[in-house]
Amino acid sequence: MAIEFQGVTKKYPDGTVAVDDLSLTVEDGTITVFVGPSGCGKTTSLRMINRMVEPTSGTVLLDGKDIRETDPPTLRRGIGYVIQHAGLFPHRTVLSNVATVPLLSGWDKARARKRAAELLETVGLPAELGKRYPAQLSGGQQQRVGVARALAADSPVLLMDEPFSAVDPVVREGLQDELLRLQSQLGKTIVFVTHDIDEAVRLGDKVAVLRVGGRLAQYGTPSDVLRH
Ligand code: ADP
Ligand code: ADP
């Protein structure tokens, strides 16, 4: 599902312009990375796709349709979301964290748990870790659970906000490889936010470079962006 920003601006009530007249298209089935320094509007841009943040002006289209025509809960059912510290429920086991998603969409418990176990395997986690609580996993393992949970929604769109930033560089490379491998199988439309240009170039089919003030400085393939 393509995502289109048409002249999108977000000005917060205190006057901060976080995103300034952003226009670009995230093509269907690709990974687009939003990169730039802290405060350049990456998270705000991402959250305007699932209506966690509403633009001040401009339009966001999903699959050609203005997202304002879809109420936020319905919209979010089609959009997975992964954040930096995985955002796991601390008082539920790893398996239950993932199984919650299919349960919420009406699957019975046995089927939801089976699906969750498959997803843990998909992201490279040993089955026995399913019984642990999130705090008993390493940072890298928690991020894998976060990715498994986002995949559980089976949604065509995945939003990832600095999902690998809290883990050490070696683990991060493993997670990046895993994401690229998953993407080659699943073909989702992924918007990935990072402040790390190396990560952006490694993962992106397209890279959008933002600068502080929320303006798009560059948009193109990784080699286009590196050339400038
Ligand atoms: P990034 O993800 O690139 O770090 P953000 O989108 O989080 O950038 O923030 C962009 C700008 O908007 C920053 O100046 C930030 O301080 C400001 N900002 C973010 N959220 C809010 C908010 N809720 N209210 C006011 N200003 C905000
Ligand atoms: P990583 O390099 O992936 O961040 P860590 O060094 O944090 O790994 O953890 C190494 C191993 O120790 C992992 O297999 C993890 O599951 C296990 N581990 C980490 N913290 C805990 C904990 N609090 N309880 C049980 N096992 C843990």
Image: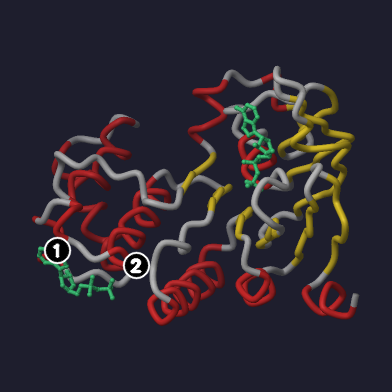
Which residue is rendered at x = 50% and y = 45% of the image? 155
Which residue is rendered at x = 21% and y = 58% of the image? 117
Circle 2 residues within 10 Å: few <14, some 14–19, many ≥20: many
Image quarter (top left, top right, bottom left or bottom right) of the C terminus: bottom right
- Name which quarter of the figure residue 131 lies in: bottom left
The amino acid marked with disc number 2 is Val
Tell me if the residue at label 1 has its CB under 8 Å from ligand 2.
yes
Confirm or deny contact between disc 1 and disc 2 (CB under 8 A): no
Residue highlighted by disc 1: 129
Q: Is residue 3 left or right of residue 115?
A: right
The amino acid marked with disc number 1 is Leu
Percent position (x, y) of residue 100?
Answer: 26, 38
Percent position (x, y) of residue 150?
Answer: 42, 49
Q: Which mark is residue 117?
A: none
Secondary structure at badge 1 equals helix
Ranked by sequence position, the earlier of labels 1 and 2 is 2
Percent position (x, y) of residue 206?
Answer: 76, 65
In this view, the residue in front, 108 or 47, is 47
Percent position (x, y) of residue 122?
Answer: 33, 67
- Relative vertical location of residue 72 with respect to residue 101 in this rendering, above or below: above
Q: In the image, ligand 2 is in what quadrant? A: bottom left
